[in-house]
Image (tube, helix red, strand yellow):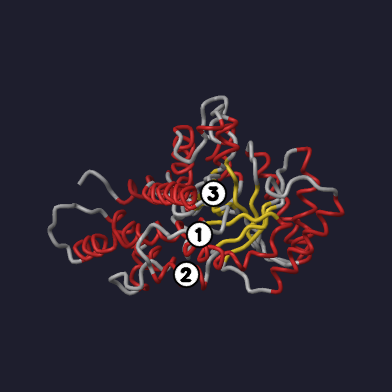
Amino acid sequence: MGLNEQDYADIDASLVAHDAFLKARYPGDRPGRQPVHTVYIPADKLDGFRDWGDHALDAMRRHDFPWPDDPTVRDKLAREPIEDLRVDFEDGYGVRDDAEEDAAVRKAAGILTAGPRPPFLGIRIKSLEAPTRRRSLRTLDLFLDSYGAPVNVTLPKVSGPDQVSAMVTLCEKIERSYGLSTGALTFEIQIELPSAVLAADGSAVVARLITAAGGRCTGLHYGTYDYSAAAGVAAAYQSMEHPVADYAKAVMQAAAAQTGVRLSDGSTNILPVGATAEVHAAWKLHHRLVRRSLENGYYQGWDLHPAQLATRYAATYEFFRDGRDAAVTRLHRYLDRQDSGIADEPATARALAGYLLRGLDCGALDDAGFPREQLTALA
């Protein structure tokens, strides 16, 4: 043998720093349930969020929902229509005077405190750009003072790592002020500008945003229309499946892989409203886009209208049910070391387990072929 114990020790010593970097920067997928969507509701229109499921079911009845009747989808809409609620103080809410926005913050906090609430919730503040910075900070502080913490905080229109670093500093100050544990406050970053994806030197800015967050970034949310407009795409062609969107999301996906930062696709602004023909056209578009996102590895998206919940769950449940049997068979063969026509690797086994867990979490599957504890251990 040409190597001795000292050689092994020398190589270990030379890679100590890199080993520590890998452990900190790429801890793996974030454990626990990820919501299948985020519903953004302007702060001044929050009152009716508990009725979204009823509105979705009513739309399905009135417009003859063009997919097979699925009792589990209807049950989901009746029981838990919104998985992740974001009270919007940014674009959906607009610019108001300070007294009006202060009142809206307190009212929203009161509505959420009264319950019942979705499993996940938070607020989208205004951006940290100079014109809206002070209002953004005041809204966040007032909401935490009125409602409490922790909550999901969405930081929009991020253009560079300095804004993320400032958000980290803000979280640290708020934690000290409210007596919260270090790291209790986390946030999501909205990718709405090309400058947040690609820097002037050609580097991927989004990777630096994750680094600047110091472990506090839980998600990257793609902003379909702001990003497309900033990239120069004509309004009629702005969509979740435009090539500029696919490029941005591919860079986001590569930057976030194995970091514990989750991905969320954007929204479609073609809403299922109007005559039945118009509603059906919007539903078919939304159903196709949701399925496309899932197939591309984006397990979350935005919904803007109650009737979109019908196609959100119909497409999501179909996606997991369509692949359930094949995933179970492949995972059994991998675990039993059986020969098959697919040579799966450990990473694929983790992906198969993760897929089945997601199906359980959202309600698409009630039997994933394995105990949840075993899937969790594999994932």
Point out which mark residue 76 bears.
2
Placement of the C terminus among the 4 image quadrants: bottom left
Q: Sequence order check: which comes first, mark 1 or mark 3? A: 3
| Secondary structure type for disc 2 | helix
Nearer to us in this view, 1 or 199: 199
Query: Can you name the residue that lies furthest to the right here?
Result: 99
Residue type of the residue flagged with mark 1: Leu
Q: Position of residue 364 (x, y in %)?
A: 38, 66
Q: Residue at x 52, y 58 (%)?
A: 307
Q: What separation in Å lies between label 2 and label 3 (alpha carbons)?
A: 21 Å
Badge number at residue 271? 3
Mark 1 to mark 2: distance in Å?
A: 10 Å
Q: Position of residue 241 (x, y in %)?
A: 44, 39
* Point 54% across, 66% down: residue: 53
Q: From what the image shows, is residue 374 above or below residue 211?
A: below
Q: How many marks?
A: 3
Query: Nearer the viewer's eye, disc 2 or disc 3?
Result: 3
Residue at 55% x, 50% y: name it.
274
Q: Is residue 138 above or below residue 241?
A: below
User: In this rendering, would 338 be left or right of 320?
Assistant: left
Q: Which residue is mark 1?
A: 309
Q: Secondary structure at mark 1?
A: helix
The image quadrant of residue 180 is: bottom right
| Type of amino acid under label 3 | Leu
Q: Is residue 304 above or below residue 83?
A: above
Q: Is residue 43 left or right of residue 186?
A: right
Q: Nearer the viewer, mark 1 or mark 3?
A: 3
Tell me: 300 left or right of 170: left
Q: Label 2 amino acid?
A: Lys
Density class for disc 2 (Cα within 10 Å; few <14, some 14-19, many ≥20) is some
